Amino acid sequence: MATKLNLKELSKREDRLAPGHRLCAGCGAGIVVRQILAAIDEPVVLANATGCLEVSTTIFPYTSWRVPWIHNAFENAASTMSGVETAYRALVKRGKIPEQNVKFIAFGGDGGTYDIGIQALSGALERGHKMMYVCYNNEAYMNTGIQRSSATPMGANTTTSPAGKVIPGKMQPRKDLTAICAAHNIPYVAQASPHNWRDLMEKARKGVAADGPAFLNVLSSCNRGWRHDTDTTVEVMKLATETCVWPLYEVENGVWRLTYKPKVKKPVTEWLQAQGRFRHLFRPENQYMIERIQQDVDERWERLLKLCGEA
Ligand SMILES: Cc1ncc(C[n+]2csc(CCOP(=O)(O)OP(=O)(O)O)c2C)c(N)n1
């Protein structure tokens, strides 16, 4: 019987990411990992691309991982896990190891997923490996000092898209990787955020239960890069869904479904105001950027509503 997704039952489970790691106070990544691993009852094997999560949880000679864990280069978490999953299947087939319903999971940041690892990810999804790839999406290359990635939202101030006289932050809208993964026609794709823990945990369960590849794109606030107080992580992520900047939805065997619909769609200014990386947008000369951002969010939301049969 699967552990019930209620706090009482979940609190009895041992954390599979031990405390004492070196993630920053208020980091979203640790919350994402703990929720996902707590949702899964089966044994898991993990691969982790280079990035904040990897470096902060494995400071030699210590590790926070209470599960088998492999570090690999920035770009190939998906290929590594494909190989592990294939090796496992082959060994089970030859009777060398018992079948234990092991779940294969890869974690990567948005830099490692949207940019450098997209080729390995796409290959793994297309080959149909039974694995779940999770992007903990903090919307920039945070580990190396807040450089923009293709997941960075338009208007954000980063060290490689610095807001100033030349540009008002990043000029391009972000890549829609969730839709790109859905276009691989794999069994399960979802977008989630840990402020809505039950939603994220249900998606993690569906992802590992899928008969083939699954991809989860999970928002993961970085207060160093997003510039907010360490104790507002969860509220800021909630604002992303309430403003429809980060809608929560899933695509199960090709069927698109919203898993949360805000009662009142808040203006993007509420999400932007909560973070220092967008502060410059509130100067009068940058007002046009806020309008562009709102328009982009509205268009994407309308498209999503149609895909989900809600409009
Ligand atoms: C091929 C390669 N390019 C660049 C680097 C340097 N590098 C290490 S971590 C990192 C940023 C990782 O960003 P992301 O994947 O978004 O994860 P985060 O640190 O934000 O959690 C970079 C550029 C590397 N290790 N390998």
Image (tube, rainbow, N blue to C red):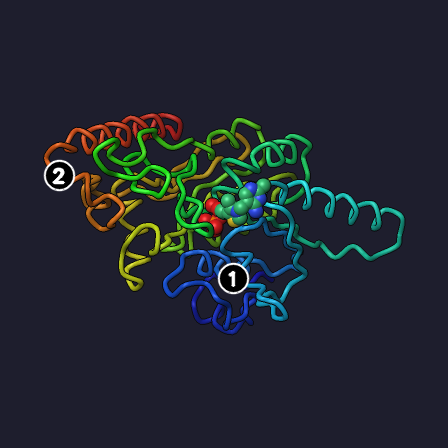
Of residues 26 and 303, the one drawn nearer to the viewer in this rendering: 26
Does any portion of residue 134 appear in the rendered image?
A: no
The C terminus, quarter of image: top left
Of residues 73 and 199, the one drawn nearer to the viewer in this rendering: 73
Q: Position of residue 210 (x, y in %)?
A: 61, 43
Q: Position of residue 232 (x, y in %)?
A: 28, 60
Kindly identify which residue carries mark 1: 56
> What residue is rendered at 25% in x and 31% in y?
166
Cβ atoms at labels 2 and 1 below 8 Å apart:
no
Q: Secondary structure at mark 2?
A: loop
Q: Secondary structure at mark 1?
A: helix
The kind of residue tagged 1 is Ser
The kind of residue tagged 2 is Arg
> What residue is rendered at 50% in x and 63% in y?
4
Q: Is residue 141 above or below residue 257?
A: below
Q: CA distance from mark 2 to mark 1?
A: 36 Å
Question: Relative to residue 173, is residue 74 drawn left or right?
Answer: right
Q: Position of residue 259 (x, y in %)?
A: 39, 43
Kindly identify which residue carries mark 2: 283
The N terminus, quarter of image: bottom right
> What residue is rendered at 44% in x and 45% in y?
141
> What residue is rendered at 19% in x and 38% in y?
281
Does any portion of residue 290 appear in the rendered image?
A: yes
Q: Position of residue 193 (x, y in %)?
A: 40, 50
Of residues 58 and 159, the one drawn nearer to the viewer in this rendering: 159
